[in-house]
Image (cartoon, rainbow, N blue to C red):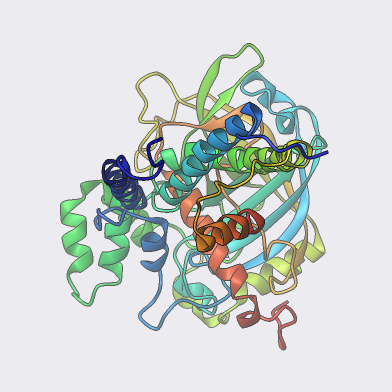
């Protein structure tokens, strides 16, 4: 099932960067939201909640895509500790 | 072949470092860590706490209260102003809370000037109209920032702090006059409760109306001196409303007032002229009273920005500030539930 590619598939790369943008945004919105009593508080909460759910949905899609397409092997010249960190952080995520 | 991981390393590393520092800086700015003057929900909530510290497990303000359930009977007249289902003719279940504007859940009733009523009306589609109203005819201050300054003045050791505040804030005078000279009553059922904040109603044609609302008591209001109220005991309001509602449901008329062009919609210290259009949209009936420790209002946040479609916040800055502060208070008190046992021994009625 899992075919070894040299790179992640375009869908995986798109999901990666989309989620990176969403997670950064949700962090900024969250920390801004809990530190203000200005009217923008309501706007920020109104974005924060659906954005969080969207990230959850993207994560599920991402898992499904990963199961379907797998991942390319790590570069052969990567030091062992970095390989371990890469694998461990993927499982942690 | 060139080695893959060598020449661009320094430049890339510098770019990465600059990027991380920029993001961290932006994050710190967003979080308010670079602006200690910013009014945060935490500061606002902390400013309510008495010198001895907040009462754990309780609301940080309006801490003393008692739950009730009942019904809101909408007469349908409000549909002219808003398409909210709660204003279309019908009977909708209500969860409410009578309360006192104090951070002390054990404050003697006769010592607290501001009495409040929190309300959640639910309609079959699952939409809710939540509102928290008080008996004062105007709010003490015009902005959340000034409210914070007022709380600081109230908590100050300087005996002249309130006088200094009042001199600097003439908008405080109408509230101070009501607090000093307004009528005291012997019952939650005899109070008029006011939204004070303005909201926007959107009718079926999409037209917007800026409104405030009030609950007008059906019960006769009887003025009672604070000396007399003191004699009735520390918890007379809760005992009285429990007995009164057990005898018969207590009712209020929900009246919506519509602003005219130019009325001060963003400033709750300023009443609108008395001749503004008012519409009676329904009747609130309190049918059952329950003590708070095990009552259904205990873990409800009467957040005034939880509104059905057809209602939304206006340019009044308070509902957003209240929402932010209530959420903070809710987080704190629900995490402290063990400090406010559910089945209190010697629970009030």
> Residue at position x 73%, y 60% from top?
B68
Q: Is residue A72 above or below residue A90?
A: above
Confirm whether residue B274 shows in the render: yes
> Residue at position x 56%, y 14% from top?
B207
Quadrant where the image shows the C terminus of chain B: bottom right
> Residue at position x 51%, y 30% from top?
B211
Residue B96 horizontal/vertical position (percent): 68, 55
Q: Nearer the viewer, residue B304 or A30?
A: A30
Residue A19 quadrant: top right
Q: Is residue A46 above or below residue B163?
A: above
Q: Is residue B339 above or below residue B73?
A: below
Left or right, A35 with respect to A4, comes to left
Residue B323 horizontal/vertical position (percent): 51, 49
Residue B187 quadrant: bottom right
Residue B137 horizontal/vertical position (percent): 44, 47
User: Extreme bottom residue here?
Assistant: B345
Confirm whether residue B196 shows in the render: no
Q: Nearer the viewer, residue B96 or A23?
A: A23
Q: Nearer the viewer, residue A73 or B103?
A: A73
Residue A38 horizontal/vertical position (percent): 38, 43
Q: Nearer the viewer, residue B242 or B165?
A: B165
Quadrant where the image shows the N terminus of chain B: top left
Residue B11 quadrant: top left
Q: Is residue B277 above or below residue A71?
A: above
> Residue at position x 54%, y 80% from top?
B106
């Amino acid at each position: 099932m899992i075919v070894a590619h040299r790179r992640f598939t375009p869908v995986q790369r798109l999901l990666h960067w989309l989620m990176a943008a969403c997670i950064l945004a949700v962090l900024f919105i969250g920390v801004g939201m809990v530190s203000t009593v200005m009217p923008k508080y309501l706007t920020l909460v109104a974005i924060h909640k659906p954005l969080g759910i969207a990230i959850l949905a993207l994560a599920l899609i991402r898992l499904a895509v990963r199961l379907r397409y797998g991942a390319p092997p790590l570069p052969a010249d990567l030091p062992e500790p970095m390989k371990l960190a890469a694998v461990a952080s993927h499982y942690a995520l | 072949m060139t080695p893959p991981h060598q020449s661009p390393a320094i430049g890339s590393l510098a770019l990465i470092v600059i990027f991380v520092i920029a993001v961290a800086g932006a994050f710190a700015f967003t979080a308010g860590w670079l602006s200690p003057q910013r009014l945060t929900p935490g500061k606002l909530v902390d400013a309510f706490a008495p010198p001895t510290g907040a009462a754990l497990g309780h609301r940080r303000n309006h801490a003393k209260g008692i739950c009730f359930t009942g019904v809101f009977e909408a007469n349908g007249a409000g549909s002219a102003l808003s398409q909210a289902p709660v204003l279309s003719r019908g009977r909708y279940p209500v969860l409410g809370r009578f309360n006192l504007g104090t951070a002390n859940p054990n404050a003697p009733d006769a010592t607290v000037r501001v009495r409040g009523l929190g309300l959640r009306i639910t309609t079959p589609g699952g939409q809710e109209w939540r509102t928290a109203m008080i008996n004062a005819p105007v709010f003490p201050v015009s902005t959340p920032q000034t409210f914070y300054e007022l709380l600081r003045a109230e908590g100050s050791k300087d005996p002249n702090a309130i006088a200094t505040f009042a001199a600097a804030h003439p908008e405080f005078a109408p509230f101070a006059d009501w607090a000093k000279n307004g009528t005291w009553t012997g019952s939650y059922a005899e109070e008029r409760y006011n939204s004070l904040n303005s909201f926007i109603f959107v009718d079926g044609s999409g037209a917007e109306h800026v409104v405030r609302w009030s609950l007008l008591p059906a019960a006769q209001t009887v003025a009672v001196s604070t000396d007399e109220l003191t004699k009735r005991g520390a918890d007379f309001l809760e005992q009285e409303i429990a007995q009164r509602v057990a005898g018969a449901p207590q009712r209020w008329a929900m009246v919506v007032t519509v602003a005219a062009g130019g009325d001060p919609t963003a400033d709750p210290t300023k009443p609108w002229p008395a001749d503004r259009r008012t519409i009676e949209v329904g009747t609130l009936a309190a049918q059952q009273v329950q003590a708070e420790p095990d009552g259904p209002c205990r873990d409800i946040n009467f957040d005034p920005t939880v509104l059905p479609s057809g209602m939304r916040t206006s340019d009044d800055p308070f509902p957003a500030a209240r929402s932010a502060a209530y959420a903070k208070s809710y987080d704190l008190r629900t995490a402290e539930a063990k400090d406010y046992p559910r089945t209190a021994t010697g629970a009030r009625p």
